[in-house]
Image (cartoon, rainbow, N blue to C red):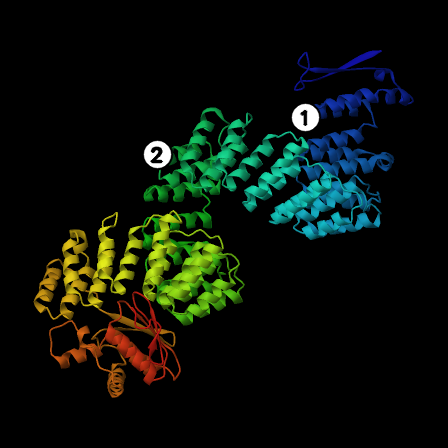
Amino acid sequence: MTTTSLSFSPLISTTGTITITITDNVSLATPTDSEHIITKLPSVLGSLKLCKNMDEIKQLHAYITKKGLNHIPTKLVAKYAEIGTPESLEYAKKAFEACNDNEKTANNRYMLNSLIRGSSSAGFCDEAILLYIEMVVYGIRPDHYTFPFVLSACAKGLTFFEGIQVHGSVVKMGLEEDVFIQNSLIHFYGECGEVDLGKKVFDEMCERNVVSWTSLICGYARRDKQKEAVSLFLEMVEEGIEPNSVTMVCVISACAKLRDLELGERVCAHVGDSGLKVNTVMVNALVDMYMKCGAIDKAKRLFDECVDRNLVLYNTILSNYVRQGMAKEAVAVLDEMVRQGPQPDKVTMLSAISASAELGDFSLGKLCHGYVLRNGLEIWECVSNGVIDMYMKCGKQELGRRAFHGVLNKTIVSWNSLIAGLIRNGDVESAWTVFNYMPERDVVSWNTIISALIQESLFDDAIELFRVMQSQGIKADQVTMVSVASACGYLGALDLAKWTYTYIKENEIPCDMRLGTALVDMFARCGDPHNAIRVFNNMKERDVSAWTATIGSMAMEGNGERAVELFYEMLRQGVKPDEVIFVAVLTACSHGGLVEQGKHIFGAMQETHGISQQIVHYGCMVDLLGRAGLLGEALDLIKSMPMEPNHAVWGALLSACRVHKDEKMAAYAVGMMNDSVHERTGIHVLLSNIYASAGKWTDVARVRLRMKEKGIQKVPGSSSVEVNGVVHEFTSGDESHQEIALITPMLHEMNCRLRESGHVPDLSNVLLDVDKREKEFLLSRHSEKLAIAFGLISTGQGTCIRVIKNLRMCSDCHSFAKSVSKIYDREIVIRDNNRFHFFRRGLCSCSDYW
């Protein structure tokens, strides 16, 4: 009798190694001693189970081969496959192929199942599917173990077509009622995005276990069907099925995506009810859910109470703090993590760099960049792009450029990060240069540069760039169209606005709340309140910004009563007002002469809604009272303001003084202004106009001399009108337009016909000390009159003439436009710097109250 010993060094025992002693007569055995060899198999199989790595399995494999233990390869294949590395799977295949035909006949289903399982687990999905095909080609009948393994491979590889074929084989073999196979089918369909097919399998199950429910719940959750996932979970609990930890993590994550704290806490109650042990994975899901639902304190308390904080948990709370705009809190957690937690990875550093950028903390950002470089994390695109963004937000433009140039494999995102940073620092010209130098551009690149042009008030250029974008085959998205709608609104180009709206519909661009609000504002600015309301009514969701845009459209039209109705309707729907919407509704009250309603809303700001009145709200109230002729009340309100009145407040009072011809109040107001307000161009112009209207030419000369000494220039009045897609601009008194030879006779005809109808020019609007004839001539050359005349000669009968003016419309031009609309039977829309005027049949939408 001999003794053979094998030592496996990595395996730990009481002696540091495991020694397998096999008592045998191998050295004396003959080919007829097979019964002795078979009796030794349990010892070898026991040794195989103890193997933990490839070296140990290979040593045992060598021993088995040497001793000729021919029945061992079946288990050996399974052990190699279990390791799940490319090397182990290759050895498993060689061991399988080494079996002779007789051995294959007996054991190959087991070995092939092991190979399929190992390949699938290791992520070699195509290999697993090929092994299944090989099994079928061999004529080996798959069993109830085979199908879950191969379906797992199809799920991981998202090979839907192959999975469908496997499902067909399941049905042909009569295994469709096997609960394990059914669960695998549900999981497969869910991973491939065909949750409805998974639901069909689920509905046909005679018996369901927790895995069945969990597979379908997770399928819904992964496909952004969070409501269905939670609903199914609640149905599962009602049927008495106890959830497991995977179920809970999945459904808690669904609640996080829904941002529904109440529903999340209702789901979490089942953790205690089911007696589940809360592990780190579940804590991570709970912290994420509470953070996303705004319950920051609960999330932090849960985080603090967790004794086993791993890297994933730290990253979860860090990323959520950054997402919530709580960069300081993120830095505090990062500090704790560095001192006593796990080593930060790329996800950690991305959050840390984002927090540095948000705080503008250059020192912290630089430290983070150093850590990234020392640990080789710059190879990750998201990290390197975050570094570029951080330096740009910290105002270190040159370091941002250097970080960009240091990126070895620059992607479109890298270029976009640089462009966005340059724009943020006001260097639009450099951003434009980088944009033109980009090797390729995506929709984000175009959106970024179009948005920058709009910020620079280059609206025509923005529209032109959008057209170039279309010509290059780049499909616009919601962000693109928000920018285009904004440009249309500022241009007041209604035809272009209507085309934009049609483009969105025809290209099926999803109209979310932000885009819907932009479209409402676009139509409002283009003088089309009907379409503005129509878009608003079609919005599925409306936040306070959407209501503000709609109320603003009513204000610009002069429909104060409808604006107030909308405001109270918004409150009834439970939408919380903000400071901006009060500006819109108070402006509407001012334009509509709704003094009492305006006073009530102004008073309710603090008393009912807890919103402090800001200087802009006082400006609206001064304008409201001033327009109504309540100059004394307006002045008293200014005196009671808790802050120093600015030029807008005083300007509102002076405008009212001019309308109501109260130069004494104007002079008193000027005496109360501080020096900074006195320097504003608008204040000097208003004061000069007030004196001119009163015929106090000496005072006019004094104000204008002071303007000249300070280098203050009055902005000339200009108006534009769009004809056949071309915008024509006119300046008061300017006769340089190429069609002036036709415009001048048209102006003469208009003045004659208006005079015959009884129209008398209001010469008080000519603020120069000249004779009556000169005043009449100057008055006839106001920019909006030139634009209207050009509109009449350039468009057909019945076409609406739309004019945009940079200054407030004077009273003479207002009465002139009313008369023209009646005599020439034309609708005329004029947008001045304050509001819209819709002239129809001799009447104006403002009812002469502006």
Residue at image position (75%, 41%) is 148
Q: For the residue carrying disc 2, how many other residues have a C-alpha within 10 Å: few (<14), some (14-19), or many (20+)?
A: few
The residue singled out by tag 2 in the image is 363
Can see residue 267?
Answer: yes
Question: Furthest-right residue in view?
Answer: 32
Total of numbered circles in the picture?
A: 2
Kindly identify which numbered label has been placed on residue 752: none
Residue at image position (81%, 49%) is 171
Nearer-the-camera pick, 142 or 654: 654
Tell me the kind of residue under disc 2.
Answer: Ser
Residue at image position (16%, 55%) is 678
Position of residue 168 in the picture relative to residue 815 (left or right): right
C-alpha distance separating marks 1 and 2: 46 Å
Residue 369: percent from the left, percent from the top?
A: 40, 35
Q: Secondary structure at mark 2?
A: helix
Residue 186: percent from the left, percent from the top?
A: 72, 46
Q: Is residue 738 above or below residue 152?
A: below
Q: Secondary structure at mark 1?
A: loop
Can see residue 485?
Answer: no
**Quadrant showing the N terminus:** top right
Residue contact between numbered discs 1 and 2, judged by CB atoms under 8 Å = no
Kindly identify which numbered label has been placed on residue 53: 1
Nearer-the-camera pick, 850 or 58: 850
